[in-house]
Image (tube, grey):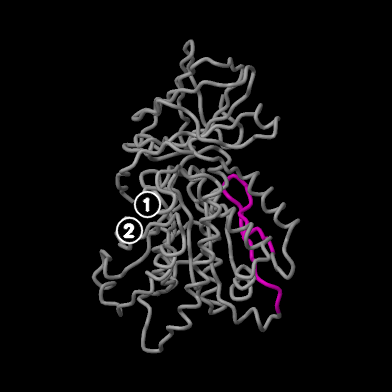
Amino acid sequence: MSLRESGNCRFQVGPNHYELILSPDINQRKEHYQWFYFEVSNIVNNVVYSFEIINCLKATSMYSKGMQPVMYSVRDAITGRGAWVRAGDSVAFYSIRFNVTFRHKGDVCYFAYHFPYTYSFLKTTISRCMSRIAPNVYCSSQVIGESLGGNPVHLLTITGQCSVAEISKKRVVFLSSRVHPGESNASWMMHGILESLLTSSDSRTEEMRERFVFKIVPMLNPDGVVNGSHRCSLSGVDLNRVWDKPSRHVHPEIYHTKAVIQYMCDILKTTPFVFVDLHGHSRRANVFMFGNNPEESWRADDKALPHSDEFLSLPEVLDQNSSAFAINLCHFGITRAKESSARVAVWRQFGVVKAYTMESTFSGFETGAYKGFQIGTKDLKEVGRDLLLGILEVSKLSRQLASPKKKASSPKKKANSVDSGSSLAVTFGKA
């Protein structure tokens, strides 16, 4: 059976073979069938069960490279060993098919495309972090708007305790996540960010809070997450394709988020130092970024902007300091099709040079210290912390290298109110 929150499967039953059918994104205009999350009960142990998702329509998938789905056993949880783990053998693709032999008779197990992260769990995470908040941390949570389904869109403001005069001198870092509901890995990276900023007393984390004001929208598309969609909001469209001109009535989640940035730039005269929108990628390994290089733009007038390599600074630092990051997978082109995405719209309309999409694999690593291993929630939370430390390092470097003669390559103009994957060479078999 499918689940109430984030679940999306129906199924047809054979003796030990289950053919599952993914429900579409609500009101979808294009077909999106990838995310799955379902429950299995009345289990008989030591019997091979076969599960096949017959309408997965992705042309390519990391399942063809050895990725496994994830499973949670209630029986293991009762005995204190509860955790989402990679499970399933004989994994096949085009339709996703895998076999499982359960260990416990009468167990109840859950399967998902990737480690689930629900809207309810996000609210629990924030509440738990607030109950363990580190000394001298300022955090406020405000609702900046409601989704089409009436779910609140939260904005967190996190910094160190200070005076009004001191806070006005701090740089702003804007982070967002989960515009695509099927990309739960984005939320796990955000989880690491929130835990670090709210609960850590590490000296580097304290320095981050002293230097920056963090503006964070941890879940841009709560309706999609609640309803088990893969790509769309209740409007049936991809919310990462409306940032250039979001509608207050059709895309309120993006409209109000963008309005916060516009208020900062136009009224407070404070342009974000860094903007990062967290995502998951189903066809590439490791963690990487998409940024904005005017010299690789489809528009001729972008190429005439003063040259600057500032957009490379954060990816280069992460490549040096994060075991999960792979700069060789990063791309900085600006295509016509991505003009309405968050990272291009924020760069073009607000002049944020260091505006990025940060992508995490669903699968595992082909380079670096974790090569050959599948990614887990611990790794994803570590990536979130690595991102924060990378931003801190870039801030220090930018102050050291600051020069009045060097201008950032930004095409800032008045804002409207308010990627193909590469093949993975290794076979992943380790959890």
**Percent x, y of residue 157:** 64, 65
Can residue 307 be seen from the camera position used here?
yes
Which segment is the magenta one?
A: 140-162
User: Where 81 falls versus 120 (above or below)?
Assistant: above
The mark closer to the camera, 1 or 2, is 1
Label 1, label 2: how far apart the Cα atoms are: 10 Å
Look at the image and say whether residue 142 sits in the magenta stretch: yes
Q: 328 or 267, which is in the foreground?
A: 328
Direction top: furthest residue: 15
Direction left: furthest residue: 300
Q: What amino acid is at disc 2?
A: Asn
Q: Is residue 99 left or right of residue 74?
A: left
Image point 49% across, 23% down: which residue? 100
Q: Residues within 10 Å of mark 1 (few under 14, many from 20)?
A: some
Can residue 411 be seen from the camera position used here?
no
Look at the image and say whether residue 152 sits in the magenta stretch: yes
> Regarding mark 1 in the picture, which secondary structure is present there?
loop
Q: Which residue is mark 2?
A: 328
Q: Is residue 140 left or right of residue 34?
A: right
User: Where 321 falls versus 228 (above or below)?
Assistant: below
Q: Are the residues flagged by discs 1 and 2 in contact, CB closer than 8 Å?
A: yes
Direction front: furthest residue: 369
Q: What amino acid is at disc 1?
A: Thr
Q: Which residue is mark 1?
A: 367
Direction bottom: furthest residue: 404
**Percent x, y of residue 135:** 74, 67
